Image (cartoon, helix red, strand yellow):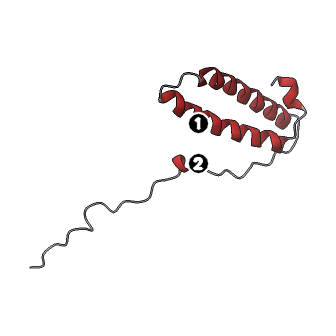
Amino acid sequence: MKHKDYTGVDSTDLQRQIQDSQEQLFRLRFQMGMGQLEGLTKYRGLRKDRARMLTVLRAKELAGEKIEPLAKAAPAALKAPAKRKGLRGLFKRKQK
């Protein structure tokens, strides 16, 4: 899409599109890491589209439009790992 196409979009829809494109970029990075180079042109185009969307969103913010942040749902890969107890809890010390 072109810059003109994003200017007419509502800011909440624009934020959702940005979030969706971020998830698509995440998936494409994995595909490229596995050797599928067909996604390279998609990846480059998606990066540019995301930059256009962020630019339009920032322009709306500077124009005085109030922009509410979306609630972020962290992908499973980015969530904090569970705490590990280690080996200390497995072995009991002998009492003297």
Of callouts 1 and 2, the N-terminal one: 1
Residue farthest to the bottom, as pictured: 96
Give x and y (percent) for residue 1: 80, 25
Residue at image mark 1: 26
> Which residue sits at x=62%, y=33%?
25
Residue 95 or residue 27, whichever sits in front: 27
Give x and y (percent) for residue 29: 55, 31
Above or below, 34 against 80 in this view is above
Residue at image mark 2: 75
Within the image, what quadrant is residue 21 found in?
Answer: top right
Give x and y (percent) for residue 4: 88, 24
> Which residue sits at x=81%, y=30%?
56
From the viewer's perspective, tell me whether residue 13 is left or right of residue 30: right
Q: Are marks 1 and 2 in contact (CB under 8 Å)?
A: yes
> Which residue sits at x=83%, y=24%?
3
Q: Quadrant of the C terminus?
A: bottom left
Within the image, what quadrant is residue 8 found in?
Answer: top right
